[in-house]
Amino acid sequence: MKKPANEINPDDAALFRATVGEVQPLPEQNRIEPHIPPRHPPHHTVAAEAIPDTLSDHITRDAPDEFLANGLSRMTLRKMRRGAWPIQDRLDLHGLTSDAARTLLQEFLHEATQHGLRCVLVIHGKGMNSPGGEAVLRRLARHWLLQRGEVLAYCDAPQQEGGSGAALVLLKSLFQ
């Protein structure tokens, strides 16, 4: 009869304790936990009419999984993936129509730039709940990001932040 996978053999446990010996907890670290910003939509401080809708929905080919503006080093994307810029705000587009998502994304990017944010997360989803499993918002959101002048780079988000269902976006700084 086979034992359940989570049951530990007493002989194995005794052997482990004998091998490891006495252990002492590590001293408490003098570290500051990183501040994780609240998950919220943009603050809507700017009227939607003030931001012209200049984004096109016409896609001739799929937007790339990652983008880097001309003149930037490939190291920028590597640094983004490694968390060199902490995520300062996020936008969730799940369940929105393409028109609503486009408007909200433009407002979000405008506001983020105005507040001097450098790295934001745009959650568009993987399309698993879409009819036919097609990631419509994923394709459109990345296509729209390519059209925005304040977007310096984007790539898939880290797994814990949504992976390929979200884009980590690096923005130009107005305060340089």
Image (cartoon, rainbow, N blue to C red):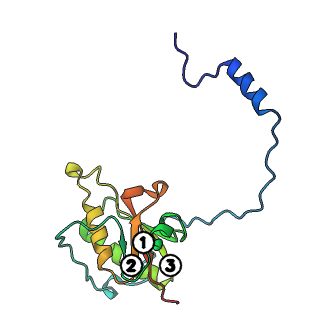
Please, what secondary structure does the residue beneath circle 1 have? strand
The circle on residue 169 is 1
**In 3D space, how far apart are the residues under numbered discs 1 and 2 (Cα atoms)?**
7 Å
- Disc 1 vs disc 2: Cβ atoms closer than 8 Å? yes
Kindly identify the amino acid type of the residue bearing the numbered disc 1. Answer: Val
The circle on residue 44 is none
Q: Which residue is mark 2?
A: 151
The correct choice, above or below, for 125 with respect to 2 in the image is: below
Q: Which residue is mark 3?
A: 117
Instruction: Evaluate whether residue 103 shows in this view.
Output: no
Q: Nearer the viewer, residue 21 or 30?
A: 21
The correct choice, above or below, for 55 with respect to 164 in the image is: below
- Callout 3 crowding tier (Cα within 10 Å): few <14, some 14–19, many ≥20: many
Q: Position of residue 140 (x, y in %)?
A: 26, 67
Please tell me whether mark 1 or mark 3 is closer to you in this view.
1
Kindly identify the amino acid type of the residue bearing the numbered disc 2. Answer: Val
Instruction: Evaluate whether residue 68 shows in this view.
Output: yes
